[in-house]
Image: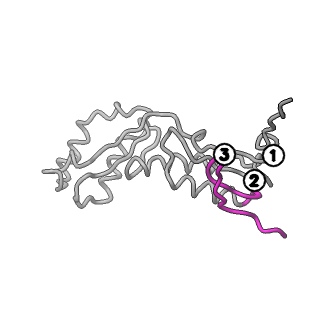
């Protein structure tokens, strides 16, 4: 007679949090403002403003947009503000930076709104592998949030979790 296989992980109080579940669905886009600079490095205000006016920003409708400059140009603060103003009521979210910084901003919003009551006084594993881009910063953010409620935090999978945090016994 074969012994029954018991899934002890399923029977434990262990909770799994997969950051991929909080990936914001939507198109990601980048805008490199060097395209509007003279020779890609010099910002001429009148030319810059005219370039923005003649650009069809509607192609970013509903997108999450990262605005950056791929050259070593010195960009005044107001230039970033002008680009942002063109995306108002068009883009779902606009950030200054690259795509990783965009993902970080999206995850920050999701993690800040996350109801952690299901994780209260439970050991939690933050799943490590994902098919979607989860920035490293998101793991730090979720750890910070979970430390106030979780009994312990681990990273990885139930079969090979790395301990990250354990609440001190009172």
Give me the C-alpha separation between circle 3 and circle 2: 11 Å
- Residue 168 on the magenta span: yes
Mark 3 lies on a secondary structure that is: strand
Left/right of residue 168 with respect to residue 77 in the rendered view: right
The residue where tag 1 is placed is 12
Give me the C-alpha separation between circle 3 and circle 1: 15 Å
Q: 93 or 52: which is nearer to us?
A: 93
- Residue 37 on the magenta span: no
Percent coordinates x, y for residue 47 in the rendering: 17, 47
* Residue at horizontal 43 percent and vertical 49 percent from the top: 100
Color encoding of the figure: one colour
Magenta stretch: give its range.
148-170
* Residue at horizontal 63 percent and vertical 57 percent from the top: 162
Left/right of residue 104 with respect to residue 114 in the rendered view: left
The residue where tag 2 is placed is 123
Crowd around label 1: few <14 · some 14–19 · many ≥20 (10 Å): few
Position of 4 relative to 76 (above/below): above
The residue where tag 3 is placed is 17
Check whether the beta carbons of the residues at disc 2 and disc 1 lie within 8 A of each other. Answer: yes
Mark 2 lies on a secondary structure that is: strand
Mark 1 lies on a secondary structure that is: loop
């Amino acid at each position: 007679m074969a012994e029954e296989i018991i899934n002890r992980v399923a029977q434990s109080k262990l909770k799994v949090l997969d950051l991929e579940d909080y990936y914001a669905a939507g198109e990601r886009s980048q805008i490199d403002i060097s395209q509007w600079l003279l020779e890609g490095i010099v910002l001429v205000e009148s030319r810059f403003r005219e370039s923005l006016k003649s650009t069809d920003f509607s192609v970013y409708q509903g997108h999450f947009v990262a605005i950056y400059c791929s050259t070593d140009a010195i960009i005044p603060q107001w230039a970033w503000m002008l680009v942002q103003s063109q995306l108002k009521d068009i883009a779902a979210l606009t950030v200054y930076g690259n795509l990783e910084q965009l993902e970080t901003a999206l995850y920050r919003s999701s993690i800040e709104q996350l109801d952690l009551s299901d994780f209260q006084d439970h050991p939690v594993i933050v799943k490590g592998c994902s098919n979607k881009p989860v920035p490293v910063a998101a793991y730090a953010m979720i750890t910070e949030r979970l430390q106030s409620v979780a009994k312990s935090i681990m990273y990885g999978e139930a079969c090979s979790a790395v301990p990250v945090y354990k609440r001190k016994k009172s």
